[in-house]
Amino acid sequence: MWFKSITMFYTMRYFFTLLLVILSTLKPGLSSATIFNVLNYGAVGDGRINDSPAFLKAWKDVCKSKSDTSQLIIPAGKTFLLRPIAFNGPCNSNNIYIQLSGNIVAPATKSEYSGSHLNTWIGFSFVNGLIISGKGTIDGRGSMWWKQPCLGNPSPGTSCRPPTAITLNRCNGFKLKDYKSINPARSHITLTNCIKGIITNLKLIAPGESPNTDGIDISSSKEIQVRDSIIATGDDCIAISAGSSLINITGITCGPGHGISIGSLGARGESDIVEDVHVKNCTIIETLNGVRIKTKQTQAIKVSDVTFKWILGTSLTDKAINLNCDQNVGCSNIVFDHVYVQSAVPGMKVFSFCHNAHGTATHTKPKPFCLLK
Ligand SMILES: *[C@@H]1O[C@H](CO)[C@@H](O)[C@H](O)[C@H]1NC(C)=O
Ligand SMILES: *[C@@H]1O[C@H](CO)[C@@H](O)[C@H](O)[C@H]1NC(C)=O
């Protein structure tokens, strides 16, 4: 018996050694990865000292590295205070991997934002193949901005607009996953001019009454997937605006918040295009709206080819479905199929408002009467 287990031990050890050898020969790419830990650049991680200079120094090396994958390590067990910071590319690596194991917090005072002309707290620009992944939390400490959005910023030339927590601008082929973002001053995540991106398994949390804390704002971006995430915030869970197309949203739990929105479009009366948006298998709870398309100067925007299918739910207001299309432009090919919305108040009636919408409604209650059967 004793003997047997010794033999087994050796066999296992041999097996593991062999496995390691096999693994390391299978993944030659790994050996070319270059790893940069912010602690080696003087970051402190006590949540009080400004770690931005250290992060920027580390970023310089990450971005310069010519390896196929270049990694920035933000280690666990520490909290790094960052003042407004811009991580700019283009970088030499095809893949920039940010391992977010530790936490990041925003400054506790507005004066620590002064001098920054960024509209965002943490910005990435022109970084292709960016991956931000890990179990860390990004805390935007936004409450001071919610209370006084336009006060207390003494530096002239600085916008008093609350900053987005994270902005990706012109970042192609990105992936954001597994982390948690809480209490941003404005939106949790803003995407502008990005092509191909995946957002998955995030938790984006802010109080229901926090103003303008969208979950994810997508503008002028294409081929973006947002999947399997929890978004509980004060404004739109996801807002898709001008110039965006091929946006898939799946498996999102949204609420509190304002629901999933397209728009506002045509705010300045110009033509805005949003195309090919698919929202599937989402659970939307305690939101101002469920799914909506918002247009401003309505005559500039033609809404067409919109299908609402298999949507079940309840409404607190009696206007459960609202199709309010422009007098002159109208909406075309609007399809309702298996949409059932009841009142959240037992026994209360709900109705559909339907103005200048064209299309069909089948198996739908309350029925939008301007649509055909
Ligand atoms: C997006 O959704 C559409 C419709 O369900 C599907 O045809 C397409 O393959 C999806 N795209 C991606 C990248 O998942
Ligand atoms: C729908 O989304 C939920 C998460 O909200 C997920 O658990 C489930 O697997 C998804 N189902 C399909 C068919 O994608």
Image (tube, grey):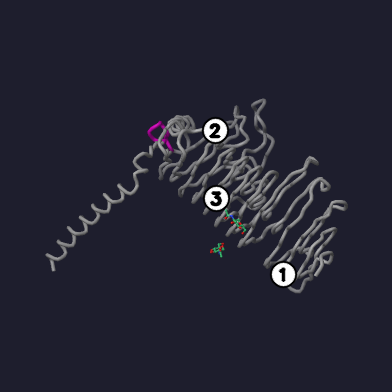
Residue under label 1, please give it.
Answer: 340
Task: Single out the residue that lies furthest toward the right.
Answer: 328
Amino acid type at circle 2 is Ala
Q: For numbered disc 2, what is the local secondary structure?
A: strand
Residue under label 2, please give it.
Answer: 86
Which of the two labelled residues, at mark 2 and mark 1, occupies the earlier sequence position?
Answer: 2
The residue drawn where x is 71% and y is 57% is 289
Q: How far apart, in angstroms, are the residues tagged by discs 3 and 2?
A: 20 Å
Residue placed most toward the observer, 100 or 35: 35
Q: How far apart, in angstroms, are the residues tagged by discs 3 and 1?
A: 30 Å
In the displayed structure, 222 sits above or below 284; it is above
Label disc, if present, on residue 321 of the rendered structure:
none
| Circle 1 Cα neighbour tier, 10 Å, few/some/many (<14 / 14–19 / ≥20) | some
Evaluate whether residue 344 shows in this view: no
Query: Is 298 on the left or on the right of 21, as rendered?
Result: right
Evaluate whether residue 277 shows in this view: yes
What residue range appears in magenta? Answer: 38-45
> Which of label 3 and label 2 is nearer to you?
3
Residue 41 belongs to the span the image colors magenta? yes
Q: Quadrant of ligand 1?
A: bottom right
Residue under label 3, please give it.
Answer: 199
Q: For numbered disc 1, what is the local secondary structure?
A: strand
Which of the two labelled residues, at mark 3 and mark 2, occupies the earlier sequence position?
Answer: 2
| Circle 3 Cα neighbour tier, 10 Å, few/some/many (<14 / 14–19 / ≥20) | many
